[in-house]
Image (tube, rainbow, N blue to C red):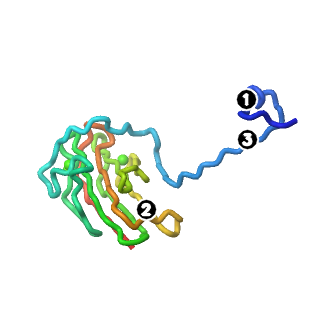
Amino acid sequence: MPCPWPLALASLWAGAGCSLIVTFDDPIADASPGADTAPTVDAGASDAGAFEPNDTVLQAAVITPGTYAGLAIMPAGDHDWFKFSLAGTSDVTIDVLFTNGAVDDLDAKLYDMTPTPIANSSGIVDNEHIIRSAAMMNAIGPGDFYIEIFGAMNNRQNSYTLVLTVQ
Ligand SMILES: [Ca+2]
Ligand SMILES: [Ca+2]
Ligand SMILES: [Ca+2]
């Protein structure tokens, strides 16, 4: 008996003999989806650290590969945007280093130049980590890319170190 399309759940339950194959091809790994609620409000706030104000994509601070310590999501509602450029297809690693606690969880996203998010890291333990590499068949570039760092919820604040590695 041929399977009807779209396949009705009723026919699955009736044991119609159809197979349903579901594939997931999104390479983005999220250790804890749903554990954090993404901020819905950008308060436009800014800490006194380097690169501020960088609260929107249009204010993104231009960086080159390296280690940037002493940054902060502070006060609550702060967003930090960074922009970097790749001359060619590259392996890119983004590390956001911080110590997590009850009210200081940060998350990070990577955007292409449009800007459309292409990766996110939203764990609930220390640090966030995004990697795009030829080995994973998802190397990026050439072009401009954006990093957004923000509190996992609007009242989350923390200091952090940003490490951008390009190979
Ligand atoms: Ca900041
Ligand atoms: Ca900011
Ligand atoms: Ca997090």
Q: In the image, residue 164 lies at what x, y percent?
A: 32, 65
What crowding class fits label 3: few (fewer than 14 Cα within 10 Å), some (14-19), or many (20 or more)?
A: few
| Mark with earlier residue (2, 3) | 3
Given residues 6 and 129, the one toward you in this image is 6
Given residues 109 and 126, the one toward you in this image is 109
Residue at x 20% of width, y 56% of height: 71
- Determine whether, in the image, residue 142 is placed left or right of residue 59: right
Three-letter code for the amino acid on which mark 3 is drawn: Leu
In the rendered image, the vertical position of residue 35 relative to residue 85, given as above or below? above
- Per the image, the residue denoted by label 2 is 131
| Mark with earlier residue (2, 1) | 1
Residues under labels 2 and 1: Cα distance?
39 Å
Three-letter code for the amino acid on which mark 1 is drawn: Ala
Secondary structure of residue under mark 2: strand
Q: In the image, residue 162 lies at what x, y percent?
A: 28, 60
Residue at x 50% of width, y 69% of height: 134
| Mark with earlier residue (1, 3) | 1
In the rendered image, the vertical position of residue 135 relative to residue 160, given as above or below? below
In the rendered image, the vertical position of residue 154 relative to residue 83, given as above or below? above
- Determine whether, in the image, residue 153 is placed left or right of residue 1: left
The residue mark sitting in front, 2 or 1, is 1
Given residues 97 and 13, the one toward you in this image is 13
Residues under labels 1 and 3: Cα distance?
11 Å
Secondary structure of residue under mark 1: loop
Do tag 2 and tag 3 residues touch (Cβ < 8 Å)? Answer: no
- Per the image, the residue denoted by label 1 is 8
